[in-house]
Structure formats: structure tokens, C-alpha cells
């Protein structure tokens, strides 16, 4: 394998991982949607919560779309295998995000046909399904999926499909593995923690802040109960590794623990990420006037999630194990785009800091003034 | 297990449903984006609050459509993977890049600045707000650019090479993909047709206000801006439409033949201005293609070849081959193309078998055969010549609907523009009714254009390389049928809700505004 090519494959796995990590952070919008009825006790409070989230939902949505687009462009074999195979999981995720997009625009509009309550229920559905299903789908990076890849099929004019799913559940079978459910729930509780921190920062209302602090405590417990066992499971689990010289895939005990030990930078970033998440939560819980926890926990979430994504792909790991045929498993070397495409897109990726900068600037401009109870709904 | 052809049909139906639904909203946001940005620019330059009020009204209409356009857009992106997974693998190396670039350059721009546009009136400076509004419009246009580059590449695959080791097509020249003449024409034609539709909707709604004797100043101001955008949009759409048709003649002759219902090619071919196809006509029988037709002599040859006496092949010629190509060579028949496709397929199998045996000489020989025949690879999946013919009536009639309505809107916009300039339009009720009732025609025109483009290129997912039956995912037909009906129900509900909100918003009219910024 050409060294240059390896560099770009790793670079793009990093970019995709970073987008995935930012998406995990941005799921605070979904977490907030799932907390709507817990925190909003009257129409005014519900209005403030929806207004607060409505300024951010498009960024979550766009991050999801870009994450998918970048994955498609850089690792098309994953896109075709997972999306074409785990059909029902992706359709459910898609469906819930479509409901979200429409709900934010229509909820306060006159003549919205279904009524405010229905759109709030749509947001609740997205708030529940989005994080759990995305979490479960990410967990299959470690627990595997039921597919076979056979590139010779392309020459079969009657059945030319190269990636085929081996059961009729098309992705729904992932819930049969409890660890996928546990990780999905961990992402769900984390999204609710981040949403609580976001509301405390963004909404200037004593009732909502008190409620959000209470929810922060409950959901932190839920998150730790799910995440810590999953972390132990991950670090002790048997994984798959690719022999770089032969491209043959082999079993390796304690694969992910080995990766962390062999790549200490990842271990350091993971620890820093977890500490920042805890710092954001604990400072908010114990210092009543502290409202900046979202920045600590948000940054920590990105770092932690980034390491989890990198663990899946770096160090010759198999990032999408096939439980039907080990040699069909996907690695960043056997599923990536060509060197030319990766190089071309790398030039484009140099603009990402510029994009982040203008998002930051626009976001800061809009958030200079906190959401208040006496704000009008004029913008809707 | 074989691929079930009904799976292909359901997958096509689901994608077509989503694309048609998506295209109800996107062109309006492209056109309205320009119109509302111009209005806010006038407000910025003059400080006249009536323009802020006008711009804000159209922004609300923009927002209602934008959300549902975004929601239906993500469905299309997902469906490339969920329903067309083999396609995603086979050409993802090329097709994925424009999608990723669209996300990085366009989507984030739109998502970020639309929030400023809607929520920032009292939070950011006037200048920053104006910049945000233009950036939303530019973002929407950039988004169109990259997805149309991707679409154009499917119709005219360039800048790529097939790699038998990875069994996929790989990009070798990004600029050939991004700047192909098909892509450039398609981008300008689609975006400018969006301007046309945006102008038609703005003019129609403004006319409604005049008919209701409400908001006269707002309506007249809106008509002034929209008629200029509309005239520019439709004139440039026609110019780029001619360019697109010429590219179709060069790269997708079967689509052109279907657009014209042309079975027997000829030199100095006439363009069918009006015609009724003979429903009994099929490839291979002796029926006359038309029950009735009026042709403009030599015009088809002129548009297709830029020569009044140029040769335009018909469906029969494209199937049977033997006619002279512009480069002097003789066209292959479909039968010969199918043989070459199969030769490419065998060569690929031989190459992969030789590679497993580490037989370098056999690999080289197979690779040579593959390279020689790969341009017809997609024909290896056909068993019958007739499979390569698209639905002629649908393409023929859609093309005529698009062209006739395009001519109608050119005349309408010029008339409204002149009368508006002479300050007489506000007093001509019958014309206001005509403009109002023309709104649905703009949508029909726009959708008809896409039907020509997408039905006309069937059966190809990628021209000559991959037909739709080799592009699908291997899932149960029932799964796709179920999701088709779920999406159909969802789209109907969303469309009714969207129209209901639009009508309420229009009935409420523009809101009074106060200038809270310096």
C-alpha cells in the first residue's frame, strides 16, 4: 500500500470521525426535544424551549447530512453496504429527521394543519429515536453487522449487487445485541445532559434553569450507568485487525485496549474529553451561578466521541465487522475512495476551519442576547 | 437469487416520487432567494421601511418552502445508499465528492445564515443581515451547483476510469467532472428556471393582492422586482435550454430521439412543434409514429447539429446502427454494443481470476480487452434491444409542455414588465387573473423539464456504464413498496400543511415593521 494513500485514508477517517463527533455533540438539539415536556410547564416555557432549539436544529441536521456525504465520498463501500443493507434503521433515522425539519418551521405557523401539539410530538419522536438509533448504528462499528461483500457479483448480470445483507431484518436485528442498545441509550442520555446544559446557558428563566439542573443530574446518572459498562465492554472485547501486508483480517483479543495503549495520544484525548464532560456537568450542578457548562461538556463530548470513532478505524482495525464473513469486513484501506478523490477532497477540507469560523461568529452574534419569557414569537 | 424487476420499478418509483416532491420547493427557494435579496438590498440602500416589509414577507414564504426542501433533500441523499447501493459503490468515488463538497460549502452556509436572516433582524447590524440574506441565496445556488454537477456526470460520465482491482469507476480529472459542458448547461438551466418559477409565484401572489385591493404599494414593488428577475430567468433559461438540448444530441441521442418521437433519422430533420403520438407505435413495427404533427422544417437538425442539413438519428437507427457519426466512423448497433459489453464483462472476470492466480500476463491481456470494450460495459446487463428505449410518450409530451410553457412565460413576463413600467398593470384585472392562474403552470413547466431529463435517460443510472437494474440495492421488494407508501402519505400530509400555511401567510399579508437598527 502506497504510504501517501495510507496517509489520506487516515486523514479522511479523521475528518469523518470529527464530523461524527460534532454530530454527537449537536444531538443536544434532539436531547432538548426529548426534554420539552419535562421542562416546559406552560405555553410560554414550551415556546422558549422550542425557540432556543430552533436556532440550532439546522446545524445538527446539516452536520448529519455532511457526515453522510463525507462518508459516502471517502468510504463509498461503507455507504453502499450499510445503507443498502441496514435499510430499516436508516429509513427510521431518516424519517425522524424529516419530521424534525418540518416541525421547526411549521409549529408556530397559522394553518399548520396538524396543530402545535402534533409537531411537538414529532420533535419528541425525533428526540427519542434520533440519538438511540444513531448510537446503535455507531455501536455496530464494534459489534458488527450481517453482510457479505463479493465484488465479483458485478459480472453477474442477474444479481450484480456486491454488498448483500444476510437476514431479512435489514438492520433492525441490531437491537438483538444488548450492547448496541446500551450505547444507543448512552448517546440518548448524553444528548439530554448536553441539552440541559444548553438550556441553562441559553434561556434566561429561573424555572427552566432549575428544571434543567434536575434533569442534568438524572440524565448524568443514566449516561454513566450506560456508558461506563460499554467502555469496559469495548476495552475488553475481541476485535478484528487487518494484516497490512496481506489485507487478511484476523481476530485480536483486547483489540481496542491495545489500540489505546499503542496510540497513547488517543488515550490522553479520551481522558481529557471525559474530564471536560464531567467538569462541565459537576461545575453546573454544584455552582448555581455557573452557566457555561455546555462549552466544557460540549468540547469534551467532541473529544471523547472522536476517540471512539478513531478507535474503530485506526491501528488496522476493522471499522465495520461482518459477522457473516470475517473477510468481508470493512477497513479504512479496503473501503476508501481512490487516492485521487481523497486528495481532491482534502483540498476542499482545508476550508473547514473557515466554515467553523463563520458558524462560530454567526452563532455568537445570535446568542449575545439570551432567550427570555417576554420575547415574542414574531420570528415564527 | 436474481434481482426482481419489480424491485427496480419500486425503487425507481420511490426515487421519482421523492425527486418530484423535492423539486416542488427547491426552484421556488432559488428564485425567491434572489428576489428577496434584491428587495433587502434596496432597503439597505434607500433605508425605506416599505422594502424591509416587502423583503420580510417574501422571506416568510421562502422559509416555509426552504424547510420542506431541506427535509426532502436529505431523503434523496439517503436513498442513493438505501435504494441504489450498487450504484453508490460503483461510482461513489466520483459521485460522492460533489455531495461532500455540497455539504461543506453550501449546506453549512445556508444553515448558518438562514438563522441570522430570520432571527437576526434585531440582533445583528443591517449590513451583516443583508450579507446573511445573500449568503443564504448563494448557499442555495451552490447547493444546486454541486448536486447538478453530480447529476450531469450521471448523464455524461467523464473524468473517470474503471479500476478492475477495486471493481469501480474512479475519478481521474476533477475539473472534467465539474466543468463538463453538460454540467454547466444543466446548472444554469436549472437555476435560471428556478428564477422563472420564483418570479411567476411572486407575480401571481402580488396580483392576488391587487385583485383583493390590498397592499397596492407592496404588490407593485414586488411586481417590479419579480418581472425583471422573471425576464432574465426565462430568457437565460431558453439560451441554456438550447445548450442543454445540443448536449443531449451529442451525448444522449436516444433521449433526443424520444424527445422528438423520431424513429427514422434523417438529414435536415424537422422539429415537431405540435404532434400527437400514435399509441400503436413501437420499435420494430411499421406504424406511423404520429397521428398528427406539424414540423418546423430543418429545425431539429439545426438545434442538434448546428447545421440545417445535419443528420439526426432516430430510435431505429440507434438500435440498428450503421449511420455515420460526426467523427466519420460508423455507429454501432445495440446488438454490437451488447456484445462489447459482454466482452468487457468477461474480460473483467478473466482479470480477477488471473489476479487470484497471480498470472501477470493473463491480467495484462484481460485488462487490454476490458479497456477496449468498457465504454459499453452497461450493455452487458441487457437481453433485449428494446430495453434501451425510454418511455417515448412521457418524454415527448413533457418536452413539449416545458417548451410551450417556457414560451408562454416569456411573453407573460415581458407583457407584465412593460405594463408595470408604464404603471398600468395595477389596473388591468384580467391580466392579474391570468398571472395568478399561471402559478401552477410554472410548476408544471419545471417538473416537466426534469421528467424529460430523468425519464429520457432511462434505462441508464449512468449513461452506457450502469443501467438501473444493476444499480439497485438487494432488499425485499415489499420493503421498498412499504416505504414508498409511507413517503407518499408523508408527502401528501406535508404538502397540504405547507399549502395551508402558505395560504394563511399570504392572506395575512406583510406585517408592519419598525426600524429598530440604525
Image: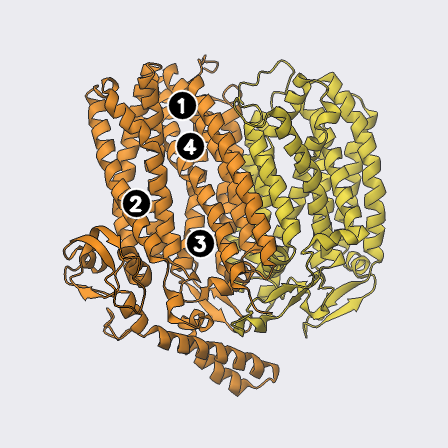
Chain colours: A yellow, B orange
Q: Earlier in the sequence, mark 2 or mark 3?
A: 3
Question: Is B237 located above or below residue A171 in the figure?
Answer: above
Task: State the separation of the CA atoms marked 1 and 2.
Answer: 30 Å
Q: Disc 4 on helix, strand or loop? A: helix
Q: Is residue A149 left or right of residue B248?
A: right
Q: Which mark is residue B150?
A: 3
Which one is in front in this view, the residue at disc 1 or the one at disc 4? 1
Q: Is the residue at mark 1 from the same chain as the one at mark 4?
A: yes
Please report, as a chain letter, where disc 2 is located: B
Question: What's the distance in space between the residues labelled 1 and 4, CA to CA?
Answer: 12 Å
User: Residue B360: horizontal and vertical position, in percent?
Assistant: 54, 85
* In the displayed structure image, the side of residue B149 where residue B87 appears, left or right: right
> Where, by quadrant of the figure, is residue A244 drawn?
bottom right
Contact, CB < 8 Å: mark 3 with mark 1? no
Distance from disc 3 to disc 1, alpha carbons, whole Å, reads 33 Å
What residue sits 24% from the left and 25% below the top?
Answer: B431
Determine crowd level at label 4: few under 14, some 14-19, many 20+ residues with C-alpha closer than 10 A.
many
Residue holding disc 2: B402
Residue B55 is tagged as 1
At 37% across and 16% down in the image, what residue appears?
B50
Tag 1 subunit: B
Q: Relative to B295, say whether A38 is above or below.
A: above
Amino acid at each position: 500500500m502506497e504510504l501517501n494513500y495510507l496517509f489520506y485514508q487516515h486523514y479522511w477517517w479523521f475528518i469523518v470521525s470529527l464530523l461524527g463527533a460534532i454530530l454527537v455533540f449537536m444531538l443536544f438539539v434532539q436531547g432538548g426535544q426529548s426534554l420539552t415536556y419535562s421542562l416546559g410547564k406552560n405555553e410560554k416555557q414550551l415556546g422558549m424551549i422550542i425557540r432556543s432549539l430552533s436556532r440550532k436544529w439546522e446545524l445538527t441536521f446539516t452536520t448529519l447530512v455532511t457526515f453522510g456525504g463525507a462518508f459516502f465520498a471517502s468510504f463509498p463501500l461503507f455507504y453502499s453496504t450499510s445503507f443498502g443493507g441496514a435499510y430499516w434503521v436508516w429509513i427510521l433515522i431518516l424519517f425522524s429527521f424529516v419530521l424534525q425539519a418540518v416541525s421547526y418551521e411549521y409549529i408556530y405557523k397559522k394553518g399548520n394543519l396538524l396543530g402545535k401539539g402534533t409537531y411537538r410530538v414529532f420533535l419528541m419522536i425525533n428526540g427519542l429515536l434520533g440519538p438511540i438509533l444513531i448510537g446503535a448504528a455507531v455501536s455496530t462499528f464494534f459489534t458488527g453487522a450481517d453482510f457479505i461483500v463479493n465484488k465479483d457479483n458485478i459480472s453477474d448480470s442477474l444479481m450484480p449487487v456486491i454488498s448483500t445483507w444476510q437476514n431479512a431484518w435489514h438492520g433492525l436485528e441490531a437491537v438483538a445485541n444488548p450492547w448496541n442498545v446500551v450505547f444507543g441509550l448512552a448517546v440518548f442520555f448524553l444528548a439530554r445532559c448536553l441539552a440541559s446544559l444548553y438550556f441553562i446557558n441559553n434561556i434566561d428563566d429561573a424555572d427552566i434553569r432549575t428544571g434543567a439542573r434536575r434533569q442534568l443530574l438524572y440524565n448524568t446518572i443514566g449516561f454513566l450507568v450506560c456508558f461506563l459498562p460499554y467502555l469496559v465492554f469495548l476495552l475488553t472485547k475481541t476485535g478484528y485487525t487487518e494484516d497490512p501486508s496481506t489485507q487478511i483480517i484476523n481476530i485480536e483479543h483486547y483489540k481496542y485496549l491495545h489500540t489505546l495503549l499503542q496510540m497513547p495520544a488517543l488515550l490522553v484525548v479520551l481522558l481529557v474529553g471525559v474530564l471536560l464532560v464531567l467538569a462541565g456537568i459537576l461545575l453546573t450542578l454544584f455552582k448555581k451561578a455557573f452557566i457555561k457548562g455546555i462549552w466544557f461538556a460540549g468540547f469534551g463530548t467532541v473529544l471523547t466521541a472522536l476517540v471512539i470513532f478513531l478507535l474503530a478505524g485506526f491501528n488496522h482495525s476493522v471499522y465495520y465487522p461482518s459477522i457473516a464473513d470475517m473477510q468481508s469486513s470493512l477497513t479504512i484501506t479496503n473501503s476508501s475512495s481512490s487516492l485521487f478523490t481523497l486528495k481532491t477532497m482534502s483540498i476542499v477540507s482545508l476550508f473547514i476551519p473557515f466554515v467553523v469560523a463563520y458558524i462560530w461568529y454567526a452563532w455568537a452574534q445570535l446568542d449575545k442576547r439570551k432567550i427570555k419569557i417576554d420575547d415574542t414569537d414574531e420570528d415564527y | 437469487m436474481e434481482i426482481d424487476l419489480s424491485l427496480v420499478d419500486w425503487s425507481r418509483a420511490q426515487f421519482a416520487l421523492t425527486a418530484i416532491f423535492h423539486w416542488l420547493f427547491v426552484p421556488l427557494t432559488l428564485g425567491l432567494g434572489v428576489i428577496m435579496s434584491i428587495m433587502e438590498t434596496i432597503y439597505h440602500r434607500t433605508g425605506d421601511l416599505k422594502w424591509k416589509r416587502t423583503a420580510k414577507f417574501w422571506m416568510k414564504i421562502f422559509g416555509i418552502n426552504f424547510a420542506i426542501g431541506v427535509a426532502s433533500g436529505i431523503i434523496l441523499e439517503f436513498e442513493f445508499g438505501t435504494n441504489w447501493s450498487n450504484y453508490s459503490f460503483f461510482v461513489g468515488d466520483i459521485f460522492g465528492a460533489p455531495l461532500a463538497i455540497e455539504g461543506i460549502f453550501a449546506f453549512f452556509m445556508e444553515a448558518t445564515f438562514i438563522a441570522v436572516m430570520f432571527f437576526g433582524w434585531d440582533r445583528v447590524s443591517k449590513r451583516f443581515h443583508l450579507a446573511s440574506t445573500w449568503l443564504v441565496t448563494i448557499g442555495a445556488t451552490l447547493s444546486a451547483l454541486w448536486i447538478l454537477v453530480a447529476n450531469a456526470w450521471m448523464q455524461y460520465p467523464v473524468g473517470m476510469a474503471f479500476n478492475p482491482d477495486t471493481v469501480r469507476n474512479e475519478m481521474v480529472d476533477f475539473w472534467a467532472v465539474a466543468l463538463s459542458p453538460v454540467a454547466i448547461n444543466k446548472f444554469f438551466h436549472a437555476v435560471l428556471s428556478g428564477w422563472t418559477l420564483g418570479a411567476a409565484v411572486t407575480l401571481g401572489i402580488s396580483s392576488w393582492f391587487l385583485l383583493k385591493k390590498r397592499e397596492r404599494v407592496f404588490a407593485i414593488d414586488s411586481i417590479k422586482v419579480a418581472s425583471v428577475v422573471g425576464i432574465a430567468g426565462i430568457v437565460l433559461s431558453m439560451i441554456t435550454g438550447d445548450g442543454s438540448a445540443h448536449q443531449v444530441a451529442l451525448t444522449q441521442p436516444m433521449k433526443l430521439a424520444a424527445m422528438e418521437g423520431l424513429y427514422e433519422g434523417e438529414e435536415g430533420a424537422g422539429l415537431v412543434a405540435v404532434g400527437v403520438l400514435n399509441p400503436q407505435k413501437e420499435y420494430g413495427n411499421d406504424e406511423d409514429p404520429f397521428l398528427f404533427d406539424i414540423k418546423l422544417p430543418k429545425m431539429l437538425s439545426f438545434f442538434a447539429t448546428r447545421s440545417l442539413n445535419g443528420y439526426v438519428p432516430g430510435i431505429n437507427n440507434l438500435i440498428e446502427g450503421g449511420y455515420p457519426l460526426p467523427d466519420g466512423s460508423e455507429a454501432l448497433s445495440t446488438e454490437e454494443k451488447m456484445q462489447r459489453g459482454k466482452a468487457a464483462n468477461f474480460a473483467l472476470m478473466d482479470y480477477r481470476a488471473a489476479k487470484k492466480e497471480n498470472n501477470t500476463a493473463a491480467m495484462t491481456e484481460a485488462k487490454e480487452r476490458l479497456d477496449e470494450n468498457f465504454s459499453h460495459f452497461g450493455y452487458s446487463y441487457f437481453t433485449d434491444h428494446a430495453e434501451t428505449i425510454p418511455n417515448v410518450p412521457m418524454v415527448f409530451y413533457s418536452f413539449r409542455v416545458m417548451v410551450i410553457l417556457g414560451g408562454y412565460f416569456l411573453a407573460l413576463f415581458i407583457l407584465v414588465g412593460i405594463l408595470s413600467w408604464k404603471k398600468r398593470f395595477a389596473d388591468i384585472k384580467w391580466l392579474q387573473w391570468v398571472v395568478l392562474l399561471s402559478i401552477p403552470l410554472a410548476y408544471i413547466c419545471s417538473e416537466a423539464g426534469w421528467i424529460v431529463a430523468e425519464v429520457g435517460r432511462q434505462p441508464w443510472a449512468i449513461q452506457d456504464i450502469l443501467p438501473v437494474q444493476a444499480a439497485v440495492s438487494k432488499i425485499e421488494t415489499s420493503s421498498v413498496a412499504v416505504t414508498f407508501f409511507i413517503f407518499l402519505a408523508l408527502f401528501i400530509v406535508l404538502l397540504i400543511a405547507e399549502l395551508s400555511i402558505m395560504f394563511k401567510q399570504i392572506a395575512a399579508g406583510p406585517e408592519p415593521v419598525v426600524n429598530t437598527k440604525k
